Amino acid sequence: MPPTEHPIHSSEDLQQIVDDVYARAARDLGKGKVATYIPALARVPIERFGMAVATNDGYFASAGDAATPFAIQSVSKVFVLMLAMRLRGASLWNRVGREPSGNPFNSLVQLEYEKGIPRNPLINAGAHIATDCVTAGHADPKQTILDEMRRLAGNDAIDFDPEVAASERATGHRNAAIANFLKANGNLESAVDDMLDVYFHQCSIAMTCEDLARAAGFLANRGVDPRTGVRIATERKARRINALMATCGLYDAVGSFAFHVGIPAKSGVGGGMMAVVPGDMAIAVWSPGLDRQGNSYVGVRALEIFVNAIGRSVF
Ligand code: GLN
């Protein structure tokens, strides 16, 4: 088989690969630690593991807990960034950079050195800028974000998890510090509490791997949702979001992830990960045990085994 052709010609082919990847990655279940700094996340059992893959040509397969909703957490940053890019165009980049941070996702030190301009929109500080644009730009920003997730996943049952949102608000002192710091530097338009309320809610959105694999379809398919044929973003915006995921999507583990896996991806502390093979397919994995950088231990393994199985990488 020529190396450029992926070995998937039916949903059955895909299901076989997913089942095999799932079984191999599941051997690492139990490794890592469930996030506890947001108390509502700590109650999720570490053995949970789901995986779903949706190809641009319409094949779909899933395994394990792929239909169980979890809080998407920082995976939401990708979608809110897309909404902010839609609202603000190029001027967004006056307020946030596009370089990997090399620091933990909730770091404060870099923000002070760099005068309130976050390194990129996929760490917390930069995500606050994108959320600020949506908060300032829509009458009901929470509903706007929710509606977009429902539309992209084709699932109107998707909703916020109010317990997760409240739990994060009660303990989100670092995020409050970041937001206040942005405000002090003149880089936040909305009131701090208004922006944070939207941010905590977007992080609490409960989705399944099946939902996320579908929602990421437009990133795998040059901006067009492969399921509905609707253009969600221009081809250039989709390519740029993928570039940001590839360089900033896994925080200070992004280099190792590029080395071992080699596709654009975004993680969240709920243990969810969304990844795309541009031009081919979208993949979602979920397992709540996290490594030291806050990325799903088994999720990263599953993606590594999967890309090796299909012989794909963007590098
Ligand atoms: N809600 C989390 C936080 O702001 C999101 C972080 C993440 O998923 N990495 O701390």
Image: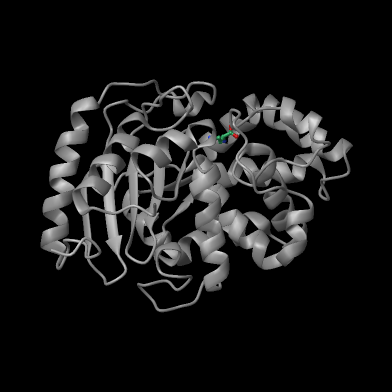
Q: Is residue 2 above or below residue 45?
A: below
Indicate the position of residue 218 as horizontal and vertical percent values. 44, 67
Please name whichever residue, 95 or 290, is drawn nearer the observer in this view of the structure.
95
Indicate the position of residue 263 as horizontal and vertical percent values. 39, 50
Q: Is residue 176 above or below residue 241?
A: above
Indicate the position of residue 81 as horizontal and vertical percent values. 61, 55
Residue under the image location 62 percent in, 61 percent down? 83
In-image side of 130 versus 67 (left or right) = right
Please name whichever residue, 260 or 267, is drawn nearer the observer in this view of the structure.
260
Residue under the image location 27 percent in, 52 percent down? 52
Please name whichever residue, 285 or 244, is drawn nearer the observer in this view of the structure.
244
In-image side of 46 versus 36 (left or right) = left
The way the protein has been coloured in the rendering is one colour
Residue 159 shows up from this direction: yes
Residue under the image location 75 percent in, 45 percent down? 194
Q: Is residue 96 above or below residue 4?
A: above
Q: Quadrant location of the N terminus?
A: bottom left
Q: Hey, which quadrant is residue 12 in on the image?
A: bottom left
* Quarter holding ligand 1: top right
In-image side of 155 versus 148 (left or right) = left
